[in-house]
Image (tube, coloured by chain):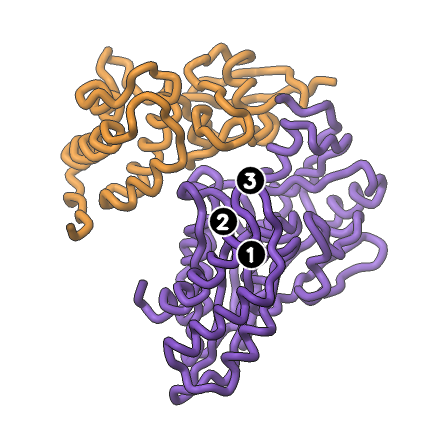
Amino acid sequence: MTTPLRLYVNGDRYDLDVEPRRTLADALRDDCGLTGTHLGCEHGVCGACTVLVDGQPVRACLMFAVQAEGSSVRTVEGLAPDDDTLHPVQQAFWDNHGLQCGFCTPGFLTLITGYLEENPTANEEELRDVLSSNLCRCTGYQNIIKAALAAQRTMNAESGAEPAEQAPA
Amino acid sequence: MKPSPFEYHRPESLEEALGMLARDPDESKVLAGGQSLVPMMNFRLASPTRLIDINRVPDLEGMSVSGDRLRVAARTRHIDVQRNELPGPLGELLREAAGHVGHLPIRTRGTFGGSIAHCDAASEWCQVAALLDAEMTVVSASRGERTIQAADFFQSIFTTSLELDEILVAVTLPVLGETWVTGIAEFARRAGDFGIVTATTALNIVEGVVAEARISLGGVHEIPFRSEAAETVLAGQAFTPELVVAAAEAAADEVDPPSDVHGDADYRRDLVRALLPRAVRSGMGAT
């Protein structure tokens, strides 16, 4: 049995008709056609399906789409502005070789974006702790950490925020 | 990897939620953060046919102090427990323990009360509840409210004394005075994993003497394990590092841990020896 559902994703409205058991991840991919959100493990371990719900990173495989009714959802498709440039986190992944196969990348991009927007002065230790949320089988993580730190510098320069406090060596 | 079908209910008040639950308690599950329930449903280890989503029920989130008790409303998210600004050793313990609960995207959804009602022996919140003899406030439509002590609440693996028609609405913890030292130490293969063994400690040290000792261990028993042996070693004695080591030995002798793919019983006993003193030291600002 399906139920009508109105979702707001990346500022667009989607009027859907889904079963309550439809996860947010499946609704984004199959009903909204936003296949940038990837599904790896479907039990909350790998983080590939991470999206922002009302600005907070969540596992889209552990939330039913009906639960997102009335919330604002942001996926990897909603990060870059409409002017053919990349979001600072995406640009930093490009510049620092923060991806190889790319499967985990959307989850990392949304996770880092959500975290840095709320914690612009996070230090490297805190960033590493947050990045432990998601799995990557290609990069060995070092370039993802470099990319996150580079993205932080760009985002803070753009917003005029204080530079990050680095953890003592 | 997809859940089986269910009816979805989203009550807007506690009364409505309890009424829905009472109509078919055997087939219903309460959905809060969903960070344990939904993976189990995705694996079809759980196939409830009715889900009662309490995320829109008002007054189920937040922490408040009244006298010497802290009330944590059941749907308070892990992230909000981690961000608590409660001064003193209890606030410190809750912040530190929250840092071991899953990862950021789990903490934004998962709830304090949900974790306790789920009763995973490795759960940090179950440890803390056992450590501090928490009181669980539960409500049902027909019998109203009752409180359950932690020692009676945790029954067995994933089993509590919560009845099928009851909802856990709050957990109450004692606000510990400044003479208390609290700590937690956990060993997991990867950051954010469930701890293989976790030690949580709360010592009331008055003028150099341990006036009261509370030790709770995770990963060594089906439910959080209060180590009476370690508490007995510590109580009434002058506080020294050697005393803590002796308590850890007593705890390691007392426990009868399971053996599984993550570590055999001897390995877990070794972890108890290592982690109990580490938990005490972490509470004293050392590592």
Quadrant location, the C terminus of chain B: bottom left
Which element type, helix, strand or loop, lies under badge 2? loop
In front: mark 3 or mark 2? 3
| Amino acid at pointer 1 | Gly
Q: Are marks 2 and 1 in contact (CB under 8 Å)?
A: yes
Q: Position of residue B230 (x, y in %)?
A: 54, 73
Q: Are marks 3 and 2 in contact (CB under 8 Å)?
A: no
- The residue singled out by tag 2 in the image is B195
Q: What residue lies at 52% left-to-right and 60% top-to-bottom?
A: B63
Q: Position of residue B15 (x, y in %)?
A: 75, 49
Q: Earlier in the sequence, mark 2 or mark 1?
A: 2
- The residue singled out by tag 1 in the image is B218
- Indicate the quadrant where residue A148 lies: top left
Drawing shade for chain B: purple
- The residue singled out by tag 3 in the image is B261
Please, which residue is most extreme toward the front here?
Answer: B266
- In the rendered structure, the answer to whether residue A87 lies left or right of residue B169 reads left
Disc 2: which chain?
B
Q: Position of residue B261 (x, y in %)?
A: 55, 40
Q: Residues within 10 Å of mark 2 (few under 14, many from 20)?
A: many
